[in-house]
Amino acid sequence: MRVIIGEDEVLLREGLRQLLAQDGFEVAAAVGDAETLQEQVELLQPDLVITDIRMPPTHTDEGLIAALRIRESHPGIPVVVLSQYVQRRYATELLDQNSGGFGYLLKQRIADVTTFTADLRRVAAGGTALDPEVVSVLVTRASRASGAVGSLTPRQLEVLSLMAEGRSNARIANDLFLSEKAVVQHTSHIYTALGLSVDGDDHRRVLAVLRFLASVAEEYR
């Protein structure tokens, strides 16, 4: 899998390069600014892009803007954005995309190498990976703003949060010490409560949940 990294901090950029290479990824390029990132994506057409949100020259949202432009011009290229802090607006902008193949992770997750690289592979395969802290913010705000989410039981909220992170039914069952049948029952109730259709495609179901959470969280600013 060919990857391009966009990260202005040299130590983190080189650390990511080595970490990914050791886990079987091919790092096609590792750059320090958003403009060069976009140029390298155009040139190399990677299988996955990983970029910091804050990039030179202003260190605000250049990386996010680059990610959105890459997704617009190359919708088939999956993108994972990294951030130091939870920024709900960034998550909402990513969720405005019409397909999977995106992730929003906090940099602290990199330390858990196994989970981090698994998230990267899930995004590269067309899935989603949203940081648990980002999901927590969305679920909390949605619970306050929406009677639908507020009607869910604590266990169903746990299932909803893991669904929003992009976890499979099997992973949810394992994490919550439930049977897969119980997880299916919980997810069915969640879809009904949120007024979402039960689609056979896991990615589309996750996207539907994420968009619902993002929309009600946006209303509760």
Image: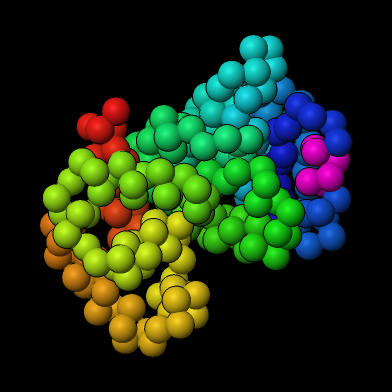
Residue 67 position by quadrant: top right
Seen at 64% across and 63% down, the residue is: 115
Quarter of the figure with the C terminus: top left
- The answer to whether residue 150 is magenta is no
Seen at 13% across and 57% down, the residue is: 195
Task: Work out whether 24 lies above or below 33.
Answer: below
Q: Which of 42 and 200 is in front in this view?
A: 200
User: In this view, which residue lies farthest toward the top?
Assistant: 58
Q: How far across and down, in percent of the image, does residue 68 sit?
A: 49, 30
Quarter of the figure with the N terminus: bottom right
| Main secondary structure of the magenta stretch | helix
Residue 162 position by quadrant: bottom left
Task: Work out whether 113 lies above or below 96.
Answer: below
Q: Can see residue 128?
A: yes
- The answer to whether residue 14 is magenta is yes
Q: Which of 201 and 217 is in front in this view?
A: 217
Q: How far across and down, in percent of the image, does residue 15 sit?
A: 84, 45
* Image position of 96 (left or right of 198): right
Q: How far across and down, in percent of the image, does residue 21 sit?
A: 82, 55
Segment colored magenta: 12-17
Seen at 86% across and 36% down, the residue is: 11
